[in-house]
Image (tube, rainbow, N blue to C red):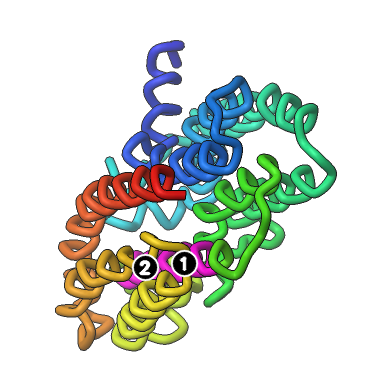
Amino acid sequence: MTAGATLRQLLIASRPVSWINTAYPFAAALLLTTGRVDATLIIGTIFFLIPYNLAMYGINDVFDYESDMRNPRKGGAHGAVLDRRFHRVTLWAAGLSCVPFVIYLIAVGSPLSWLTLAASLFFVVFYSAPPLRLKERPVADSVTSSIHFFSPAVYALILGGAVWTWQLAAVIVAFALWGIASHAFGAVQDVVADREAGIGSIATAFGARITVRLAIICYALSGIAMLGATWPGPLAVVLAAPYIVTVWPYRSVSDADAATATRGWDRFLWLNQFTGFAVTLLLIWFALVR
């Protein structure tokens, strides 16, 4: 097990394609709150870009090893099948890579920000790790997965001393609903593999068809929630439409055919790039008009 091979496995386990999904919310929220680029913004962004994702996905790959071996979808952007030889080093790397960043963020934060960061990391660990293993608890799995992505933004707002308003809360609610919908739809494609492995999920509990429809409802509610945001936030309501269009063809999929939803999930991964670009434009507009 060479250093090069280990680093390659750690990189794959951290899901580089998803790094931006956690770093961007933190960076955008902190920059809009404080209006400055400083050490905290840079260090926090790096933390949520790489160590946070290595912890989230690396821990997942270690404790999901048995089920991943049975899942033909695993590999690449859909998740690594992490060789047992790398399990221990992955857990150590995930923990140790987070430590210096967490120490810095504690030093510059407040008790409320410490609590928020602790909660975020709690859900990162116990989404996959026993004894809680929240990913096997239907509904809690989707809620916890959503927390992984909106909690960096909430943490940044608290760290930066943002003034909470109903408009700001609407944005976080919209983000949370988007995360729940996205996880639920992602779980659909694994219904058969999860059941064979004895793993519970929102999709194994409700079935593929109902889960897809719940995802559609949550995407729609996410768009509606953005109507309560400060201008030009309400324009983001249209960003929910492409997700609904992507998921809609699978609204009546059976459990036996649920694996076909992988095609929709592949489009979802690309759709996130477009959505991120559109959100960036709206944030720039917001920064200019406020």
Q: Is residue 177 magenta?
A: yes
How far is mark 1 from mark 2, CA to CA?
Answer: 6 Å
Q: Residue at x 47, y 49 (%)?
A: 290
Which quarter of the rendered picture does the N terminus lie within?
top left
Q: Is residue 31 left or right of residue 112?
A: left
Q: Is residue 198 visible?
A: no
Q: Residue at x 52, y 27 (%)?
A: 46
Q: Main secondary structure of the magenta part?
A: helix
Residue 267 in picture, x, y percent from top left: 18, 58
Task: Name the image quarter holding residue 106.
Answer: top right
Name the amino acid type tagged 2: Pro
Q: Which residues are magenta?
A: 170-188
Q: Is residue 152 left or right of residue 246?
A: right
Q: Residue at x 36, y 73 (%)?
A: 223
Task: Give the camera-side residue of 130 and 50.
Answer: 50
User: Which residue position is annotated with label 2?
Assistant: 234
Residue 209 in picture, x, y percent from top left: 29, 86
Q: Residue at x 52, y 42 (%)?
A: 32
